[in-house]
Image (cartoon, helix red, strand yellow):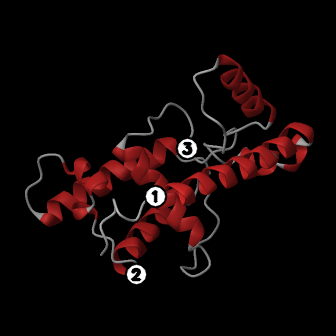
Amino acid sequence: MKNKKTDLNPAAIERFVQETWDHVEHLNNIARLHPESVIRIARKRIVWPGFISRKRAFQKNNAKLMRDIQLGNDFVLTGEWQPDSSSARGAFLVHWWGTTMQKQWGLPKLTEKNKTTWFDKVWRCIIEELHIVPEKDPMLARLSGSAKTPAAMRAEIRRQTRKAFDVLIRH
């Protein structure tokens, strides 16, 4: 593998910044002029491409855009949650894999009535079919608490993730 330092080409980075600027500007012009064309997408997302700046005008424009496109109004996580929370991220992970692999794993649409069995099947598939090892994942491992054995760690991670899933996931 090459040294990352030597792979940095200032001209290529500058082009990348400019191209990104162009794409974000174009997307946000569409959103400002025709918000109805992006609302369906934006309502389900928690982040949106934008420009960061120390200047208040950019911050105000971003805030207005977020309101106009209804950013995050239908995001899968509801209520009070922290982006850095391992349990919230675990709940989101289970939901994301479940909805992404819904057909392949034979899952019904997630409802309040089937939430428990839906979670259980997705958790099993994540481990058995995707070979994800929760106790070795740095983010999920934080949920293992004082558990010492891999089985106890996995059980505690599952318990904490399930608890967050029950509270935070919109169905």
User: In percent of the image, x 35 and y 63: which residue is there?
Assistant: 6
Q: CA distance from mark 1 to mark 3?
A: 11 Å
Q: Specify the farthest residue to the front.
A: 11
Q: Earlier in the sequence, mark 1 or mark 3?
A: 3
Residue 57: percent from the left, percent from the top?
71, 20
* Res. 120 image quadrant: bottom left
Q: Which mark is residue 129?
A: 2
Whole-percent x and y of residue 18?
67, 50
Q: Distance of mark 2 from mark 3, alpha carbons?
A: 25 Å
Three-letter residue code for mark 2: Glu
Which disc number belongs to residue 62? none
For numbered disc 1, what is the local secondary structure?
helix
- Which residue does the numbered mark 1 point to in the structure image? 93
What amino acid is labelled 1 in the image? Answer: Leu
Question: Residues under labels 1 and 2: Cα distance?
Answer: 15 Å
Q: Quadrant of residue 157?
A: bottom left
Looking at this view, is 115 or 2 the one in front? 2
Tag 3: amino acid: Leu
Q: Residues within 10 Å of mark 2 (few under 14, many from 20)?
A: few
Res. 144 in view: yes
